[in-house]
């Protein structure tokens, strides 16, 4: 019999506590609040029971968890973004611990607007939570990823941990491709 494993390595999720915090943050931002209102109509994005029910309908389907848009650094400034990254990563690690048959691994989210904190969170997520890589977005609040400030993040992921980097596209209509 052929192997029936279907491993989705780029599904998006909002762990419950992170989603609740994000909704609180969005109350002061009309555009973000409108986006979140659309997500309320996609329960598999934020409702774990709905996600697991959907996943079980496909034989052999597993997900390596990644955080959905918006990027951590879009939600909060450099002082608050590290706590949001920890909240997101802890939530995904909890899902992996409770449902390893459906979600065998997570990809760490980092506060890219605070590089020292991003390096610390990568260390924590990889060594303590078991993250199998990191996710970054194609720009950091409009700044290109090849800005020398971000080099230590890529260097640590590749040279220290030898882990992959998930690159999530993000841009506004005003951002050139």
Image (cartoon, rainbow, N blue to C red):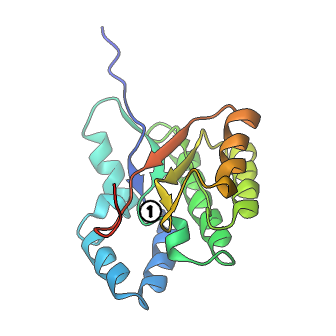
Number of dots carrying numbers? 1
Q: Estimate the x, y position of residue 96 in percent, counting from the top left.
A: 54, 46
- Name the residue rendered at 51%, 78% in the picture: 21
Please state which of residues 145 and 112 is positioned toward the viewer in this rendering.
Answer: 145
Q: Estimate the x, y position of residue 91 in percent, counting from the top left.
A: 56, 60
Instruction: Classify the position of the N terminus by image quarter.
Output: top left
Crowding around mark 1 (Cα neighbors within 10 Å: few <14, some 14 to 19, many 20+) is many
Q: Estimate the x, y position of residue 176 in percent, counting from the top left.
A: 34, 60
Instruction: Classify the position of the C terminus by image quarter.
Output: bottom left
Please state which of residues 14 and 4 is positioned toward the viewer in this rendering.
Answer: 14
- Name the residue rendered at 40%, 87% in the picture: 29
Residue 90 placement, left or right of 14:
right
- Name the residue rendered at 29%, 64% in the picture: 43
**Looking at the image, is 51 positioned above or below residue 46?**
above
- Residue closest to the far bottom: 28
Q: Secondary structure at mark 1?
A: loop
Residue 101 placement, left or right of 46:
right
- Residue closest to the far top: 1
- Name the residue rendered at 62%, 72% in the picture: 81
Please state which of residues 23 and 160 is positioned toward the viewer in this rendering.
Answer: 160
Residue under pointer 1: 14
Please state which of residues 157 and 27 is positioned toward the viewer in this rendering.
Answer: 157
Residue 35 placement, left or right of 146:
left
Q: Estimate the x, y position of residue 5 in percent, counting from the top left.
A: 36, 24
């Amino acid at each position: 019999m052929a192997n029936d494993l279907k491993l989705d390595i780029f599904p998006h999720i909002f762990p419950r506590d992170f989603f609740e915090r994000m909704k609180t943050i969005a109350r002061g931002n009309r555009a973000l609040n409108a986006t979140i209102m659309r997500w309320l109509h996609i329960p598999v994005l934020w409702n774990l029971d709905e996600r697991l029910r959907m996943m079980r309908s496909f034989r052999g389907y597993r997900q390596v968890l990644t955080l959905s848009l918006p990027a951590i650094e879009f939600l909060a400034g450099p002082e608050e973004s590290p706590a949001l990254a920890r909240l997101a990563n802890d939530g995904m690690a909890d899902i992996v611990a409770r449902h390893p048959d459906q979600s065998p691994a997570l990809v760490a989210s980092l506060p890219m607007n605070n590089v020292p904190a991003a390096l610390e969170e990568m260390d924590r997520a990889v060594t303590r939570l078991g993250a199998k890589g990191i996710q970054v977005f194609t720009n950091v609040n409009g700044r290109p990823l090849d800005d020398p400030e971000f080099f230590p993040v890529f260097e640590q992921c590749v040279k220290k941990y030898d882990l992959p980097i998930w690159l999530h596209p993000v841009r506004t209509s005003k951002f050139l491709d």
